[in-house]
Image (cartoon, rainbow, N blue to C red):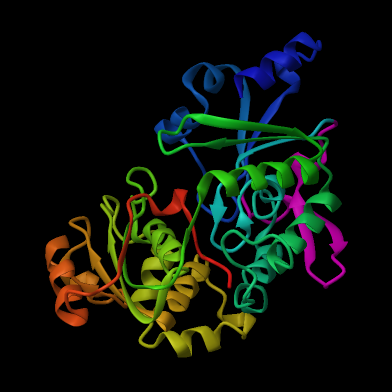
C-alpha cells in the first residue's frame, strides 16, 4: 500500500479522494488490531478505509449476468470510483487455482448473491476447480469474467516465500499480470513426486494460516494431490482460535454424513456461509483417511470434524506405521499452503 499511496500523492490526488476498500468477500469485516496489522497505523489514521459487506442490502449494483448466468452484484463504493486499483497475493488456491488478480473482485467485493453461485457445487465439484489449475478451471474463468465486468484499471500482485518476503511483483493489466504471476509462483512452489505416497504428513504453515480448523483444511488440500486412493493424511495445526466462524462450526457440528451434505448443496435453499470449506474437506475424505492433532480444539470437539482425532502428533505417526508397515512411503510437507504438490505426469 505505501508505494501505491505515494504514487497517487505524487500524481496530485489528495488523500481525501482516496478510499481503501477491504475486499472481505463474504467474511467478517477487518477492524481494530486486525486492520492495523493489515494496513499499518499510519495509513489507518490517515486514509478513509471501508470494509465490503456482502450481505448488506443496498450496498451493491447489479451489472447483469455472465455468459453462464451468474448474477453479478458488485460493491457500489468500488464501482463509483474513477480509478480502480486492485492488490493481492498470488499463491496456490484451493478452488481458484491461484489467488490474486480477479479474486480481489470476486469474491472480494461481490455480493452474497453472486457468491452463492460461485461457491455452489456446480463449480466447486468440477475436477478442474482445484489448486494450481487455471486452464479450464470454471471458477477462475467465471471470476475473471465478473472482474472484467466490474472493471479494473490497474492490478498489483505480489508473491512471497515461506519467510513472507516478497519474491515477485506483477503489475498492470489484471489478466496478464495475474497470468505471469501465477506462472512464476508455480515454478517457485511446485514439487513433484514420481508416485503417490501411502501417507502424507502436513501442516498449514503456522500462524496465521492455521489459526482455525477452517484455515488448516488448506494444508489437507495440498496433501490430497499426492496421496494414494485409500491412503492417510496426518494434519498438525495450532487452531488457536478454534474451529472457525460460527456458521462453519454450526454446520460441521450438525452434519452427520459428508456425502449427504454435498448432495444437499445442489439445493440453493441450503446455502450457508463457509459451506465450501466443508465441501473441500469432503473431497479429501473421499480419497484418504484424515488424522488430526491440535491442542487448540478440545478432544471431544475434534471427534466431530470427520477426522481421526489424536492426542499427539506421534500417535498419528505410530498409527500410520502400524497400518502400512516399515516399507510405508511417507511424504512430509512442513508448510502445506505454500507448496504446489503434484504427481509426475506419465
201 relative position to 132: left or right: left
Q: Residue 237: x and y, percent?
A: 28, 55
Q: Nearer the viewer, residue 291 or 299?
A: 291
What percent of the width, then of the height, locates residue 290?
31, 74
Quadrant in which the N terminus appears: top right
Q: Residue at x 77, y 55 (%)?
A: 144
Q: Residue at x 18, y 69 (%)?
A: 316
For the C terminus, the quadrant is bottom right
- Quick check: is 58 in the magenta stretch? yes
Query: What's drawn in magenta, residue-wise?
Result: 53-82
**Residue 312 visible in this rendered orientation of the protein:** no
Question: Which is nearer the eye, 293 or 51?
Answer: 293
The one nearer the camera, 124 or 183, is: 183
Q: Give the answer, above or below, for where 298 lies relative to 47.
A: below
On whether residue 220 falls in the magenta region, the answer is: no
Residue drawn at x 62%, y 39% as measured from the top left: 88
* 313 relative to 44, above or below: below
Nearest the viewer among 66 and 166 is 166
Left or right of residue 114, residue 319 in this image: left
Q: Quadrant of residue 4?
A: top right
Q: Quadrant of residue 95?
A: bottom right
Residue 58 position in % (x across, y down): 73, 53
Q: Is residue 261 visible?
A: yes
Query: Where 326 falls versus 342 (above or below)?
Result: below
* Number of callouts: 0
Q: On the rendered structure, is 217 left or right of 192?
A: left
Amino acid at each position: 500500500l505505501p508505494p501505491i499511496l505515494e504514487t497517487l500523492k505524487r500524481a496530485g490526488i489528495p488523500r481525501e479522494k482516496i478510499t481503501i476498500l477491504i475486499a472481505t468477500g463474504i467474511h467478517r469485516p477487518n477492524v481494530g488490531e486486525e486492520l492495523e496489522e493489515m494496513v499499518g497505523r499510519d495509513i489507518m489514521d490517515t486514509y478513509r478505509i471501508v470494509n465490503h459487506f456482502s450481505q448488506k442490502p443496498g450496498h451493491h449494483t447489479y451489472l447483469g449476468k455472465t455468459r453462464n448466468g451468474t448474477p453479478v452484484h458488485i460493491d457500489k463504493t468500488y464501482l463509483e470510483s474513477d480509478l480502480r486499483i486492485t492488490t493481492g497475493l498470488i499463491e496456490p488456491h484451493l478452488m481458484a487455482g491461484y489467488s490474486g488478480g480477479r479474486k480481489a473482485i470476486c469474491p472480494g467485493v461481490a455480493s452474497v448473491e453472486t457468491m452463492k453461485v460461485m461457491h455452489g457445487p456446480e463449480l466447486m465439484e468440477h475436477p478442474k476447480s482445484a489448486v494450481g489449475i487455471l486452464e479450464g478451471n470454471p471458477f477462475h474463468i467465471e471470476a475473471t469474467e465478473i472482474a472484467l465486468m466490474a472493471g479494473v484499471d490497474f492490478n498489483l500482485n505480489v508473491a512471497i516465500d515461506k519467510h513472507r518476503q516478497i519474491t515477485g511483483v506483477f503489475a498492470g493489466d489484471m489478466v496478464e499480470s495475474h497470468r505471469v504471476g501465477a506462472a512464476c509462483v508455480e515454478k517457485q512452489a511446485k514439487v513433484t513426486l514420481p508416485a503417490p505416497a501411502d501417507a502424507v504428513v502436513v501442516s498449514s504453515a503456522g500462524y496465521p494460516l492455521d489459526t482455525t480448523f477452517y484455515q488448516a483444511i488448506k494444508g489437507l488440500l495440498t496433501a490430497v494431490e499426492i496421496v494414494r486412493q485409500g491412503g492417510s493424511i496426518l494434519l498438525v495445526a495450532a487452531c488457536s482460535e478454534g474451529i472457525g466462524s460460527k456458521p462453519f462450526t454450526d454446520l460441521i457440528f450438525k452434519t452427520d454424513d459428508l456425502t449427504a451434505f454435498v448432495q444437499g448443496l445442489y439445493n440453493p435453499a441450503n446455502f450457508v456461509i463457509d459451506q465450501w470449506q466443508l465441501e473441500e474437506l469432503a473431497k479429501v475424505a473421499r480419497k484418504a483417511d484424515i488424522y488430526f492433532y491440535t491442542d487448540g480444539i478440545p478432544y471431544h470437539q475434534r471427534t466431530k470434524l470427520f477426522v481421526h482425532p489424536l492426542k499427539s502428533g506421534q500417535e498419528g505417526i505410530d498409527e500410520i506405521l502400524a497400518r502400512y508397515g516399515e516399507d510405508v512411503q511417507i511424504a512430509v510437507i512442513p508448510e502445506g499452503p505454500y507448496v504446489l504438490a503434484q504427481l509426475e505426469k506419465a
